[in-house]
Amino acid sequence: MGIRDLGYKRYEGALLPHRSRYRVLIRRALSLAWASGLTKTTIILGMFPPVICGVYIFLKHQAMQQEVVQYLAHRAQVQLDDPGSLVFTCIYWCQIWFAFVLSLLVAAPAISEDVRTGAFQFYFARPVARSHYLVGKVAPAAILVAIVTLAPALLLALLRVGLAQSGEEAWRSTSWLVGTLAYGPIYALVLTLPAVALSSLGRRSGSLQGLWAVGFFLSWLLGEGVAAGADLPYVALLSIPTDLRLVGQLLYGIEPAYDLPWYLPSLVLAGLVVGSAYVLVRRLGRVEVFS
Amino acid sequence: MSEPRVVADRVSKWYGKVVGINDFTVSIGPGVTGLLGPNGAGKSTFIKLLVGALRPSKGELQVLGERVWGNRHLLGRIGYCPEHDGIYEDLTGAEFVTFMARLAGMSAEDAARRADEALERLGLAKAKDRLLGQYSKGMRQRAKLAQALVHDPELLLFDEPLTGCDPLARVQITQFIKDVGQAGKTVIVSSHILHEIESMTSEIVLLYKGQVLAEGNIYRIREMIDEHPHQIRIECDRRRELGQKLVLSQDVRAIEFPDEGALVLETHNPDACYPLIPRAALESGIKIRSLTSPDNNLQAVFEYLTRERSPEGVARQGRAA
């Protein structure tokens, strides 16, 4: 019979550098999010609109090769080949719902859950910096949002480049690729950073998720409603989704929905992101976070 | 004499107008040291200061020769088991301890291996793949101890590690703490129950109202405490049946039934009483949910000690002399 020595055993191995904490925290948050059925379902459902768009772009491209379709399009004065707006329509009008649900499920309770359970006492009793923790909370939510926005939009833009019949057509399509690469990270940051900042302000995840949803949709309704109803386009800037839309239209070279100086929506979104980052840094940098 | 691992020099910590600890000076060396004091004495505040969770309002605090506040690198040399749970209930015991080891900087492979070893050492090998949400209080405490130890720290801080544990978990945790102390680690354990601390070490620091009342050997304070009856609260089913069994012992001074599902036993000899309880429960097939000790007796001793230290007490001693 072997008798196992259960006495104290020293650790002889090496320790990884401090930057490894980023990876550990991000992986942990991603696996936790993936374990949730709701998150998984949202991501899977979020793949359908881009697939439909992809099929549509492909079929349209095939049809465009037929002379009869070109003739009919010419007669009807219809601009058929406009994949840039299609990519934008997909990433904005379709994917914003999935991205929002993900931000609601993953970003809005990211810190409040730790405040509620008192998990800070475990994190910050380890050699984990506030910056590790912060990135470990924001990055996973941003990655998940990017999975349903940036990734499919990028694939659609690539598909369009791949289908190009001429060098000129391919070059035109490349601009949508660049637009997508710029728009995706902005999209992910705008939908996650404010939600994570909000989650640092309390311990009740449900209430904070509700607050995020109300803020998002109320600003949308009021901003767009007042802007359209009272013909006050500047009011539309109060709406987070409208600002995202205007920045997207700018990046994809599409005519903007409101006649406003091009830089204003970008400034509003930059203010939102910087303000959220400031709140997070202040909250986490506060002395004695787990007293 | 070995070099002190923890040195607090006139450390104070205020929460606004509330005093956490006040003018706290103490020096702690290797081995197990007990922080003993009634609730609100400042034990948890001192431990949180040691782990860098709180910033001292005043004074100098050195741990393992380094300042604590804002010293992230030092935290890799410290293991902390907090009083409150604060653990993710949707993680298994193994996942929780592995995650904590990863945060300490271990590779995935080493972390998993060390987590398994730590959980096995604490008697959780069979339960390591169960969710923490399904763990009993005693199992959670042991999982927290495992995460504190997993990265092989030099200083271990255990805040009320026996709170709410069943008798078996108490025995296992007590033995574990003694083993770690014997392995050359510096261990600081807090409790408001003398008997708990006494079973782990004879070195204690007595705290009361945020101040160090005394430090050194436990036996002197033990004599004073024995003059006051010790209370043990037992939460169990069929409490009257258990009470009938226990009252037969000459070490049990009185038994009360303060509320539903609990009985409180009063004794002058806790050492004899603590083994008696599980034995009596086992004989009758009674399930004990928790054993706790209200700190009334300790409170009385501390009040006695502080009276003796007050100007009136000093004058009284002078008159008696």
Image (spheres, coloured by chain):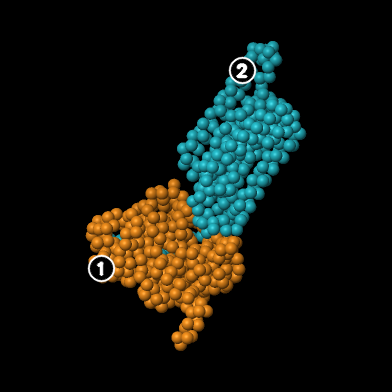
Chain colours: A cyan, B orange
Name which residue type carries label 1.
Answer: Ser
**Labelled pair 2, 1 in contact (Cβ < 8 Å):** no
- The image shows residue A51, relative to residue B221, as above or below, that is above
Which chain does tag 2 point to? A
Query: In front: A262, or A132?
Result: A262
Query: In front: A165, or B32?
Result: B32
What residue is rendered at 65% in x and 32% in y? A222
Mark 2 Cα within 10 Å, few/some/many (few <14, many 20+)? Answer: some
**Disc 2: which residue:** A63
What residue is rendered at 51% in x and 50% in y? A116
- Between the C-alphas of marks 2 and 1, the distance is 96 Å
Mark number displayed over residue B249 = 1
Relative image position of residue B81 (x, y in whole percent)? 46, 60
Q: Is residue A232 left or right of residue B241?
A: right
Name which residue type carries label 2.
Answer: Ala
- The image shows residue B319, relative to residue A40, as above or below, that is below
- The image shows residue B90, relative to residue B308, as above or below, that is above
Q: Quick check: do tags 2 and 1 share a chain?
A: no
The residue lying furthest to the bottom in this view is B321
Query: In front: B297, or A89?
Result: B297
